[in-house]
Amino acid sequence: MKHIFTTLVQRYFLSIAAIGVAFFPYERSTAQTAPAVPIAHAHNDYEHNRPLHDALKAGFASVEADVYLVNNQLLVAHDRHDTNPERSLESLYLAPLRQHFSQTPSTSAQETFWLMIDVKSEPISTYKKIHSVLKSYPDLIAKIHESPQQHREPHHPPVRIVISGNRAKQEILDTLPLIAGIDGRLTDLQTELSPQAMPWISDNWRSHFTWRGESEFPPQERTKLRKFVKQAHEKGRLLRFWATPDSPKFWDELLNANVDLINADDLKGLNTHLQKRIRTKK
């Protein structure tokens, strides 16, 4: 297992150096209890100078877009009053991802790029529009089957969708095969939903921990963090926290605890730290 893990980590950084984007084995669409390659997640990606493209350049394999349904369009912005018809989910993410993967095809049927859609408007109508739009990208968006073996076709679409924020849970689950998964919360750690239906658990770090990356991580909080990781992995889910500081010390605690998705606004900083970390472990 140690040899396999080392090989995967080396492959991660080679992919960053070679083509500027990292992918992760499809098996990590559902989590595992063994140590695994972390997924760098671009928090509020649309606020960067070049949405999506900055994340791809920095080797991130997961991006986050806040979405409002406005005049039957899916517009990307943090606040409703900042929406602009020129900044849509399709123009900022779906069309560029299609172009990217047509130029840089994945080398394996088991590689996944994550697009988290954080729904900010009314959940049901917004999800119905999301579903309608995603159906126009069958070459890009992976459909999710309950059986993982059904994902192993030679040309599996590279992008998986996770719906966060105002989640129309029943409407998402009623779409079979699933075109998106549900982003769960720590209160969902013991849910009986499959890891295909709820592949992630995300939550606000500040709601559960007092540590902000300064001084030393309190031992009782380190124990709590590892308990959350264990519970998520036992259910086959990935774990992410938001409202986290961008600092090497903080990232190291998450990485040491095997948190799967490392949330960051500082794309270059996290990329640099991950590369430095793996060099010191060789």
Image (tube, rainbow, N blue to C red):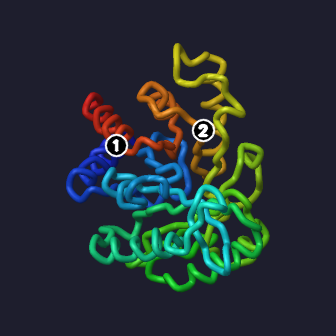
Q: Of all residues shown, which one is farthest toward the top?
A: 215
Name the quadrant containing residue 183: bottom right
User: Nearest the camera: 211 or 240?
Assistant: 211
- Asked whether the residues under the numbered discs 1 and 2 touch, taking CB atoms below 8 Å apart as contact, a structural biologist would say no
Q: Identify the residue under disc 2.
A: 243
Mark 1 residue type? Lys
Residue at (49, 28) in percent of width and height? 250
Q: Identify the residue under disc 1.
A: 268
When the figure is inspected, residue 277 is found, relative to residue 232, above or below; the finding is: above
Q: Where is residue 264 in the image (x, y as percent from the top left)?
A: 47, 42
Is residue 195 in view? no
Q: In which quarter of the image is the N terminus?
A: top left
First in sequence, mark 1 or 2: give its number: 2
On screen, residue 73 versus residue 274, left or right, reads right
User: Nearest the camera: 184 or 82?
Assistant: 82
Residue at (44, 82) in percent of width and height? 139
Residue at (44, 47) in percent of width and height? 40
